[in-house]
Image (cartoon, grey):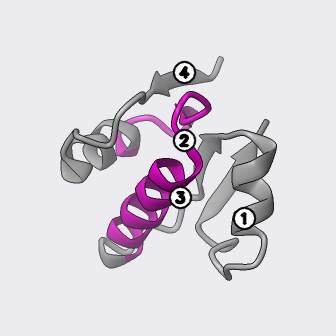
Amino acid sequence: MKNTFKLTTSKLSNEDIYSKINNSTNEIIDLSEMNLFEAVKTIMIISTYGIKKNNKNKIKYKVTPNVQKFLSEIPISNSVELIF
């Protein structure tokens, strides 16, 4: 069963978010209630932190189609999986 970790603001510490999802391999971060720019910023920061920590797992994000379309132009697919 997949767990969902819902974020509605990017005010949380990215290190705290990453440590929470790093403890569970089936964790999905739900950013579907964030606006486009906050969701993209959060994905980029958490994913970059994961690459820095040498994590080989993809981080799963639940996003809106607008966020997915925006991120399709950015080469982050190796560390990110987007779910609608």
Secondary element at image label 4: strand
Q: Position of residue 17 (x, y in %)?
A: 30, 42
Pointer 2: what residue? 35
- Magenta span has 9? no
Q: Is residue 39 left or right of residue 66?
A: left
Residues 48 and 58: in front is 48
Q: Residue at x 23, y 40 (%)?
A: 11
Q: Residue type at mark 3? A: Val
Q: Position of residue 84 (x, y in %)?
A: 79, 36
Q: Position of residue 49 (x, y in %)?
A: 32, 67
Pointer 3: what residue? 40
| Range shown magenta | 22-51
Q: Residue type at mark 4? A: Asn
Q: Residue type at mark 1? A: Phe
Real-space Cα distance between discs 4 and 3?
A: 21 Å
Label whose residue precedes the other's in the sequence (3 or 1): 3
Real-space Cα distance between discs 2 and 3?
A: 9 Å
Which quarter of the picture shows residue 19?
top left
Question: Pointer 1 and pointer 4: residues touching (CB < 8 Å)?
Answer: no
Please tell me how crowded label 1 is: few (under 14), some (14-19), or many (20+) other residues with Cα within 10 Å: few
Residues 53 and 43: in front is 43
Label whose residue precedes the other's in the sequence (4 or 3): 4
Circle 1 or circle 4, nearest the eye: 1
Please tell me how crowded label 2 is: few (under 14), some (14-19), or many (20+) other residues with Cα within 10 Å: some
Circle 4 or circle 3, nearest the eye: 3
Pointer 1: what residue? 70
Pointer 4: what residue? 3
Question: Pointer 2 and pointer 3: residues touching (CB < 8 Å)?
Answer: no
Residues 1 and 49: in front is 49
